[in-house]
């Protein structure tokens, strides 16, 4: 499970190596992440702004921005709550270029065959993201009960 706070950047550490599809080197692989809101079903796509593929896991960095951009890892996930995520492996023959026209926008996007264009290989990881509200800006806020200074005794029948 990934835990993050709304309107802030976060890192995700996801195990993608066990389900790896492409035989190419890690330098030819990027990951497309699909976030699905559990409340309203809204879908957000993003490539991580920074991605490090290690032997056992992949570190992915996402940055908050009020204007999201799927190619630079800028997200504005709303509302707070639970999101399902799906991680898709995208491979290139040439040098990976995560940009409009060279990187698939969704998991079903097919680009023309070229060394500079990425190909979605398939689903390599799924999970849950919990996105908490920023402290002090929660939709529902509670106030602590303060005990009275003296006892409140009610006398009946006198």
Image (cartoon, grey):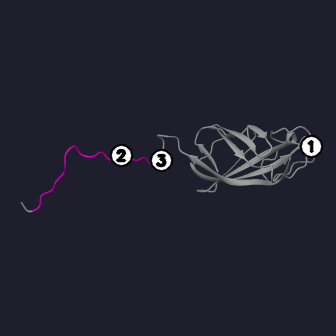
Look at the image and give the residue range highlighted in magenta.
Answer: 139-156
Magenta stretch: includes residue 150:
yes
Residue closer to the observer: 114 or 4? 4
Q: Which residue is mark 3?
A: 139
Say whether residue 22 is magenta: no
Residue 69 seen in this snapshot:
no
Q: Residues within 10 Å of mark 1 (few under 14, many from 20)?
A: some
Residue 32 placement (x, y as % from top left): 77, 47
- Mark 3 residue crowding within 10 angstroms, few (<14) / some (14–19) / many (20+): few
| Residue carrying label 1 | 93
Residue mark closest to the camera, 2 vs 3: 2
| Residue found at x 77% / y 39% | 52
Quadrant where the C terminus sits is bottom left
Which image quarter: residue 66? top right
Which numbered disc, 1 or 3, marks the residue that appears first in the sequence?
1
Q: Position of residue 90 (x, y in %)?
A: 83, 47
């Amino acid at each position: 499970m990934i835990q993050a706070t709304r309107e802030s950047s976060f890192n995700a550490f996801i195990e993608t190596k066990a389900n790896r599809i492409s035989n190419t080197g890690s330098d030819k692989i990027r990951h497309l992440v699909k976030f699905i809101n559990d409340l309203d079903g809204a879908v957000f796509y993003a490539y991580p702004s920074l991605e490090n593929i290690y032997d056992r896991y992949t570190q992915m960095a996402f940055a908050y921005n009020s204007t999201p951009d799927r190619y630079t890892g800028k997200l504005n996930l709303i509302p707070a709550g639970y999101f399902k995520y799906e991680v898709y492996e995208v491979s290139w023959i040439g040098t990976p270029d995560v940009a409009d026209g060279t990187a698939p926008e969704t998991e079903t996007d097919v680009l023309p065959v070229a060394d500079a264009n990425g190909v979605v290989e398939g689903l390599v990881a799924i999970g849950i993201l919990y996105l908490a509200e920023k402290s002090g800006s929660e939709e529902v806020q509670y106030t602590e009960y303060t005990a009275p200074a003296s006892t409140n005794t009610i006398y009946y029948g006198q």
